[in-house]
Image (cartoon, helix red, strand yellow):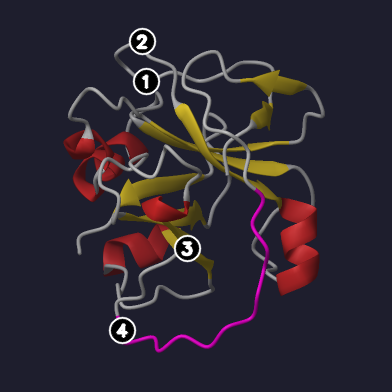
Amino acid sequence: MGGYIFKSEWPGNPDGEYLALILTIDCKEIKTETGYASLPDDGFIHVFSTYDSNTYFLDLITYDDALKQSTEQSPGYTLVVHSTSREKTLAPGIKIPRKNAELKLKQVDPNTNYVGSLLAQKSVGRPLSRELETDYYFLGQIYSSDCPAPYQDALYLTDATACLLMKKKSERNGQVGMFFVCES
């Protein structure tokens, strides 16, 4: 979580503010560890979100806004991109510190609303709509309290869970997925 990106330009939101880096996934490492065939063979998936500890922004990073963004040509208030660059770029705005996560195999009841960050091949406790299942697959969820201190409110609420979905078809404008705060 947090840290730097492997991309030459840091993305911004429609208001001209830099997006905060929430998560970076090393595709090769995760694909090797999990066998997820749907991930790219190499490079990095970067997950960004609008964040401002002094401003209300929750409505900008919910499902409705993410769905609207997915049909537009430009990035919105969240962004999921794939990069194969090896050039590191540090955050020009909010700098959420880098925090490495350890992969652990865990059985989770698919019918419960799991609270915590995870990678999974199916949504846990939050079934995807038919509309989403047509175009996306579930990759994981981020629990805001798993973000490094003092950024446990990176998803506005300290107990918020955000879903990470990846597009099934080819990239458009470098965007490869959708990221949004889920309803509780």
Between circles 4 and 1, the one closer to the viewer is 4
Does residue 138 appear to the left or right of 45 in the view shown? Answer: left
Secondary structure under tag 1 reads: loop
The residue to which callout 2 is attached is 16
Q: Which residue is mark 3?
A: 117
Could you tell me which quadrant the C terminus lies in? Answer: bottom left
- Which amino acid does the dot numbered 2 rest on? Gly
Amino acid at dot 1: Asn
State how far apart marks 2 and 4 are (Cα): 38 Å
Q: Taking the image as drawn, is residue 35 in sight? A: no
Marks 2 and 4 in Cβ contact (< 8 Å): no
Whether 37 is drawn above or below 164: the answer is: below
Farthest front residue in view = 149
Of the residues under marks 3 and 1, which one precedes in the sequence?
1
Cα distance between the residues tagged 4 and 1: 33 Å
Q: Earlier in the sequence, mark 4 or mark 1?
A: 1
Q: Earlier in the sequence, mark 2 or mark 4?
A: 2
Label 3 CA crowd tier, 10 Å (few <14, some 14–19, many 20+): some
Amino acid type, callout 3: Ser
Mark 3 or mark 2, which has the lower sequence index? Answer: 2
Magenta-colored segment: predominant secondary structure: loop
9 displayed left or right of 150: right
Q: Which region is colored magenta?
A: 100-112
Mark 1: few/some/many CA within 10 Å (<14, 14-19, 20+): some
What kind of residue is marked 4?
Thr
Give residue 13's mark. 1
Secondary structure under the numbered disc 4 in the rendered image: loop
Whole-percent x and y of residue 145? 39, 53
Residue at numbered disc 4? 112
- CB under 8 Å between callouts 1 and 2? yes
Q: Is residue 40 above or below residue 127?
A: above
